[in-house]
Image (cartoon, rainbow, N blue to C red):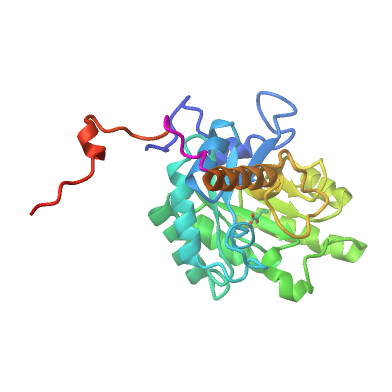
Amino acid sequence: MSVVPSAGNGKITVLSILERKSGISSNTSSPAKITCLTAYDYPTARLLDEAGVDVLLVGDSVGMAVLGFDSTLPVTMEDMLHHTRAVRRGTRHALLVADMPYGSYHEDPAQAVRNGLRFVKEAGAEAIKVEGGERRLEMIARLVDAEIPVMGHIGLTPQSVNAFGGFRVQGKTAEAGEKILRDARAVEAAGAFSIVLESIPRELAARITAELRIPTIGIGAGPDCDGQILVIHDLLGMSFGHQPKFARHYAEVGEIISRAAAEYCRDVQQGSFPSDAESYHARTEKVGAPVEQHK
Ligand code: KIV
């Protein structure tokens, strides 16, 4: 499957995402908001891609949404490459971004480049996402230098859960807000093409969005960002445990799956599944006849 952009094939690229920054598009003063969702497997990627989602993120949230961990910290490079390859096979139109997992870029910029290249060469990612602001400036610049487009991620960075003492809204005080603003400026200065703002006050997200030249993608950051992202399992009502207030359910797929599985169990136990029409039939009645004993 070719996913290389060519003129007019409708492929979303890093450049077309940059052009969607509020107020800088050549065509319109308010370009359409950027739509992003997470995806971790082939069928979900196909459905989201065909529905017209702009960006598919293979998030390290796969650890919590799919693999059953209580944080993203245990997710490995091999986990992320495996899921990114599956999403690649289902994605034609959307921009495919892969999350760098905890420990894959924390040693030094050389390690980050080595692992970033693996996402591009071995899994077909078109960009990668890293968490952190000012202290990642050199690393992001090195990734960009290696032709790997980078999406930043600041505010509530889930890989900092131990340092933050839990999954808490960030940037609520003036001082904390200023720190996040400096982080946003650093990510932009380092050359990132977009930045995720997670769980910060709406007012702060609006200020960052107004100041930066790259698009902001909000999650729990209010409606003023240039785009929005949600974890697909939250949107579909397939998550367990605490749900943040921004995780709007657009469907209750979890209930549909539970109901379907319960009905299947009932039909098997009652003998109504499979029916005769759902069974294969032999061409000759002899197939069902008792086998003759050889004497
Ligand atoms: O891992 C993830 O899914 C994310 C998004 C929620 C931004 O980082």
Q: Is residue 35 magenta?
A: no
Q: Main secondary structure of the magenta part?
A: loop
x and y percent of residue 174 in the render? 92, 62
Which residue corresponds to the image point at 59% horizontal and 69% vertical from the top-left?
102
Residue 211 in the image: above or below residue 153:
above
Which residue corresponds to the image point at 66% horizontal and 49% vertical from the top-left?
233
Query: Would you say 270 lies left or right of 114 here?
Result: right
Which residue lies most toward the left here? 295
Tell me which segment is drawn in magenta.
Answer: 271-277
Residue 229 appearing in the image: no
Residue 287 in the image: above or below residue 197:
above
Residue 124 in the image: above or below residue 288:
below
Residue 4 appearing in the image: yes
x and y percent of residue 215 in the render? 69, 43
| Quadrant of the displayed image that contains ligand 1 | bottom right
Which residue corresponds to the image point at 55% horizontal and 36% vertical from the top-left?
47
Q: Quadrant of the N terminus?
A: top left
Query: Would you say 140 lies left or right of 211 here?
Result: left
Which residue corresponds to the image point at 45% horizontal and 46% vertical from the top-left?
88
x and y percent of residue 93 in the render? 50, 34
Query: Would you say 207 lies left or right of 197 here?
Result: right
Looking at the image, which is closer to me, 163 or 252? Answer: 252
Q: Quadrant of the C terminus?
A: bottom left
Which residue lies most toward the right here? 174
x and y percent of residue 69 in the render? 63, 67
